[in-house]
Image (cartoon, rainbow, N blue to C red):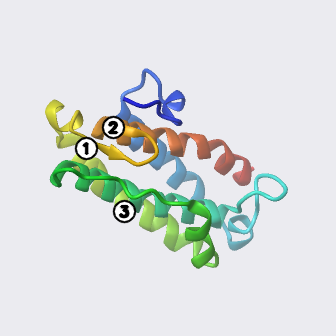
Amino acid sequence: MSNNPYGKYVDGEDLIESLDATSQRIATIARGWRKDVYDRSYAEGKWTGRQLMLHLAQCEMVFSNRLRFGLAQEDYVVQPFDQDPWMAIEDEADGVAALEAYVALRRLNLDLCRRLTPAQRTRTFQHPERGAIDVNWVITMFAGHERHHLPQIEAIAK
């Protein structure tokens, strides 16, 4: 199995618990934000709170697709995506709507993840850039990915 770029953020943790706890933490932080906070960045030249919420919602859509296609389709090959063109086509998206989309999709994805059998979690498919991966790799990727962004969201909230 190829190296997971976000695995270090959740190494040794229960992945499903991480998906649940981190999404709840992000929602708790951002649900009270005013518009000016959504427009704030955590560092010069970096994404704003609104952009981070949009990015998380977009990534949760990708997580949904990879998870379900990987489980249901024989000979599945992941479609890679580049975050920058995705951001460019909806850069002005509403931060609150993006947060709520992320949270809703996460609830749906968590429900599926909690019901996966060990055999389903080890079901393999191909990633054009990373080679053979499995469902557990995908879960690790997205659990770690949002842990990567959590400190940025916390910094915006301060």
What residue appears at the point 60 percent right and 44 percent down from the top-left corner? 150
Q: In the rendered image, which quarter is residue 2 located in?
A: top left
Name the residue nearer the viewer: 82 or 96. Answer: 82
Q: Nearer the viewer, mark 3 or mark 2?
A: 2
x then y, percent, for residue 152: 68, 47
Left or right, 118 with reference to 132: left
Label drawn at residue 132: 2
Amino acid type shown at disc 2: Ala
Left or right, 137 with reference to 68: right
Amino acid type shown at disc 1: Cys
What residue appears at the point 35 percent right and 53 percent down from the top-left corner? 78
What residue appears at the point 36 percent right and 62 percent down from the top-left corner? 104
Q: State the residue position of label 3.
A: 104
- Near mark 2 (Cα within 10 A), the count class, few <14, some 14-19 or many ≥20, is some
Q: Are marks 3 and 2 in contact (CB under 8 Å)?
A: no
Determine the CA span between mark 1 and mark 2: 20 Å
Left or right, 129 with reference to 49: left
- Near mark 3 (Cα within 10 A), the count class, few <14, some 14-19 or many ≥20, is some
What residue appears at the point 54 percent right and 31 percent down from the top-left corner? 9
Helix, strand or loop under label 2? strand
Name the residue nearer the viewer: 40 or 68. Answer: 68
Q: How many marks?
A: 3
Quarter of the figure that contains the N terminus: top left
Name the residue nearer the viewer: 49 or 77. Answer: 77
Q: State the residue position of label 1.
A: 113
Amino acid type shown at disc 3: Ala
Relative to 83, residue 20 above or below: above
